[in-house]
Amino acid sequence: MKILSAKWVITCDENFSIIENGAIVFEDKIVDIDTIENIKKKHPNEEVPEADKNSVLMPGLINSHVHLEFSANSTTLKYGNFLAWLNSVIKNRDTLIEKATQKLISTKLDRMKKTGTTTIGAISSYSFDLEPCVKSVLNTVFFCEVIGSKADMADTLFADFKSRLSGAKQYTSKNFIPAVAIHSPYSVHPFLVRESLALAKLEELAVSTHFLESPEEFEWLHKDEGLFVEFFKNFLNQSKAVTKPIEFLTHFSNVKKLSFTHCVEASTEDFEKIKSLNAIINHCPTSNRVLNNTKLDLSKLDSIDFSIGTDGLSSNNSLSMFDELRTALMIHSNENIIEFSKKLLKAATVNGSRALGLNKGVLGKQKDADIISFSLAGEVEDKEDLAMQIILHTKSVNKTIIGGVSV
């Protein structure tokens, strides 16, 4: 058994319990968690280290939605408007993918580890990021993505998707879990949605999809109007959306591990359906800001939990979860900063675990021992302020434990 201690142990459990002068006993899973004093009594034959000054232990951060295949982007793509960004992606896609070598992606993954991330939900369009994810020490739920709205291409696209998913399954392990992503309601033909989800349900794979990310998408899906009209006419010779939002959501019934990403333009009816599906919303604050100049209206979620994702470097300047948490804290300025900080840390841990269908994100008995350790620059007098101070001041971590092993 191994034991870690800290001035503050943040469990990220349902009540956001915090143990002052606490310790964790673990192997690959957490065996015990309590005050240092009680751990010494319960484990008299084990050496329990004293807590370092201002030290913190908490669950490893879970980035529930990240794209790695465009990791070469920095200043190439257009921002400020979703369609302008999408056109710039299409224009520069081949060049950016060519530059996103496996070495580059591996470097980004290593940087994510150093900034506290222990688990990712990687959305993969082409499987060019497969090998770096397999080799990474990070836990990866690898979402093979299906995309394509033209009926006459559906069989070919489905065959390609199944081939990529089969390739990912060859590397299945406790740290690498294949999953299914449906790109979005505007870009995936209902046949592909049905068949991909049937496969996911049969094998109980986690499922994720982008949903109502932009005003352009809303106008196209609801009214067959707006700026997407010209886009679909020019690129796909389509004049109508292949599905409506509620029709799209209905396909996801009986998916046990389910998340919807963005949802910034979702309606009250959409949120009610998402709630009935017991799904998580992957919130990507920076991406929403730079692509749409908007944010997720948290007041509309009505008991729907949300997780945190960085999206990819195609729509972000960082893959650090602490950077993303700071962005979320600042853009949701109507929220009480102290209470919202607690909600954000849960979003980045236990809710991310739920989104990916894992046994992580909480420091509690029998949970996977994914733990990060770091120290704050100064003392925190009131533990009610602890979550806020962590988000405001933490840039990197001192120690990362994944599955009970220091990495």
Image: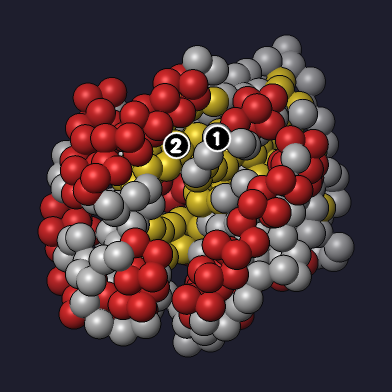
The answer to which of 368 and 137 lies nearer the viewer is: 137
Residue at screen point 35% across, 38% down: 157
What mark, if any, has residue 26 been given in the picture?
none
Q: Would you call the spot at circle 2 few (<14 residues within 10 Å), some (14-19), or many (20 or more)? A: many
User: Is residue 233 shown left or right of residue 250?
Assistant: right
Q: Position of residue 291 (x, y in %)?
A: 54, 76
Label 1 amino acid? Ser
User: CB of mark 1 within 8 Å of CB of mark 2?
Assistant: yes
Label 2 amino acid? Cys
Q: Which circle's residue, 1 or 2, is located before the other in the chain?
A: 1
Q: Position of residue 23 (x, y in %)?
A: 67, 35
User: Is residue 405 shown left or right of residue 27?
Assistant: right
Residue at screen point 50% across, 35% down: 142
Q: Is residue 66 above or below residue 174?
A: below
Residue at screen point 19% across, 43% down: 191
The answer to which of 247 and 8 lies nearer the viewer is: 247
The answer to which of 330 and 81 lies nearer the viewer is: 81
Q: Position of residue 66 (x, y in %)?
A: 56, 51
* Element under disc 2: strand
Q: Report which residue position mark 1 lands on.
A: 127
Q: Is residue 162 above or below residue 81?
A: above
User: Is residue 247 shown left or right of residue 126?
Assistant: left
Given the current orientation, which residue lies at the most extreme bottom position? Answer: 334
Query: How many numbered dots are placed on residues in this image?
Result: 2
Measured in 3D between alpha carbons, the distance from the residue under mark 1 to the one under mark 2, in whole angstroms, is: 7 Å
The answer to which of 387 and 399 lies nearer the viewer is: 399
Q: Report which residue position mark 2 lands on.
A: 144
